[in-house]
Image (spheres, rainbow, N blue to C red):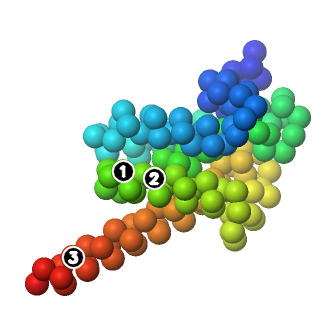
Amino acid sequence: MIDRICKFIASLFCIGYIPVAPGTLGSFVALFFYFFVKDYPELIGPIILISFILGILTAGRAEQGFGGKDSSEIIIDEFVGMLVSLYLLPVRFGYIVWAFLLFRFFDIVKPFPVNRLEELSGGLGIMLDDIMAGVYTNLILHGVHLLFFIINRVWHS
């Protein structure tokens, strides 16, 4: 029973069982969810934290049940990573699109240290590489936002 619950949560309520691009689907689920909570930024941090903890607790056990290292059915990590990508960014279409594209890029390419974090065992390794991909994305987009802010200030002064 516990194994089934872990698989259910780690697969984002069985969405991870869809055989076409499950990681991308997990990111889309996060975007869909984001549109419901975007107007309540004070909720996004706790949701990320709770989802991260749930992912650590369930993904490792689900991985054993699925029989493979970071099985494609496990997509709670993409859900959390995508939310990290969007965390505290302006809610604008451009930022959302770039967050999605950059997050998927970093999640697939796995630059250092994303690739190292993936090597950790169990739920922690499954979750941390996507969290780091989300952090990279978030930092880049916050940097772009700051740059546009500075350019705008200089231009209008």
- The residue under label 3 is 152
The amino acid type found where label 2 is placed reads: Val
Can you tell which quarter of the image residue 104 is in? Answer: bottom right
Q: Is residue 80 left or right of residue 122?
A: left
Where is the C terminus found, in terms of image quarters?
A: bottom left
Distance in Å between CA atoms under marks 3 and 1 = 19 Å
Which is nearer the N-term, disc 2 or disc 3? 2
Q: Are marks 2 and 1 in contact (CB under 8 Å)?
A: yes
The amino acid type found where label 3 is placed reads: Asn
- The residue under label 2 is 97
The dot on residue 93 is 1
The dot on residue 38 is none
Label 2 SS: helix
* Vertical position of residue 18 compared to residue 52: above or below: above
Q: Is residue 75 left or right of residue 148?
A: right
Distance in Å between CA atoms under marks 2 and 3 = 22 Å
